[in-house]
Image (tube, rainbow, N blue to C red):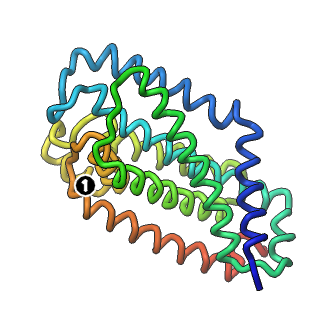
Amino acid sequence: MNYTIALKTIIKKEVYRFLRIWPQTLLPPAITTALYFLIFGKLIGNRIGTISGASYMDYIVPGIILMSVISHSYSNVVSSFYSTKFQRNIEELLVAPVPNLVILTGYVSGGICRGLLVGVVVALISMLFADIVVLHPVITIAVAILTATLFSLAGFINAVLAESFDDISIIPNFVLTPLSYLGGVFYSVDMLPGVWQTLIMGNPIMYMINAFRYGMIEVTDVDVNLALMMICGLIVLLAVFCLLMLHKGTGIKN
């Protein structure tokens, strides 16, 4: 059976959903980014100087872009799939002859689209404050897509396990946001004391941000190949976990 129509339908629904409410999904990150660059880049950055040979503005641009990709790819899937559960629309998918892989791919693709679109918006805003030159476009695009995929899967897990709207805000507020800010967006690992340098190495977002930064300005605190392998490994792990939950009906068929 050809499941292309089902996949396209889910993706179109997800994309139209966040484009229809673009003042809530695309405009806020543009405003927030402008404030980041104005406060951290211009006002504070002029006093900090350079980091690893790059100006402070150029240094923080990749981190802010990827941080936006992470938060919006995650939030798109978790809010959309949980709303489907809450409104009991998920029952239509469950009774339809649509494989779990198609359902997962559709929702994750929507998260990827929103995450990358927000990333493009943030990158365009950053061009008003810094001269953006992508030195390794293949690595840059690959890291952005892989990161959006990873956090779309994470958002799907959160949505499946969530039992209330409060549950879909706990992880972004108390896990994602702290890990993102502690992931080297605004500073280099070398600037931290010895103990904190060791602790931050356990933060997976730090590897993603540094790999993305390497792709843009060729500055990194970690091995890029290691970062890419870690991201791909986590994607496989989360994808398998998502499919297992869909197969068992965890949080869906209750």
- Residue that numbered label 1 is attached to: 201
* 10 up-or-down from 24: above or below: below
Q: Position of residue 178 (x, y in %)?
A: 42, 43
Q: Residue at x 44, y 51 (%)?
A: 144
How many labels sit on residues?
1
The answer to which of 137 and 199 lies nearer the viewer is: 137
Q: Please name whichever residue, 192 or 5, is drawn nearer the observer in this view of the structure.
A: 5
- Looking at the image, residue 4 sits to the left or right of residue 215; the answer is right
Answer left or right for 173 relative to 250: left
- Residue 158 at what x, y percent from top left? 60, 60
Residue type marked 1 = Met
Query: What residue sits 33% from the left and 62% below the top?
Result: 228
Residue closest to the eye, 216 or 169: 216
Q: Is residue 116 above or below residue 39?
A: below
Q: Residue at x 28, y 33 (%)?
A: 59
Which residue is nearer to you in this view: 212 or 92?
Answer: 212
Residue 230 placement: quadrant? bottom left
Q: Secondary structure at mark 1?
A: loop
Which quadrant is home to the N terminus? bottom right
Please state the horizontal and vertical placement of residue 204, each as a whole percent of the image: 35, 56
**How many other residues sit within 10 Å of disc 1, few (<14), some (14-19) or many (≥20)?**
some
Image height of 118 relative to 127, above or below = below
Identify the residue at image location x=45%, y=55%. 147
- Residue 14 left/right relative to 133: right
Quadrant occupied by the C terminus: bottom right
Q: Position of residue 86 (x, y in %)?
A: 81, 57
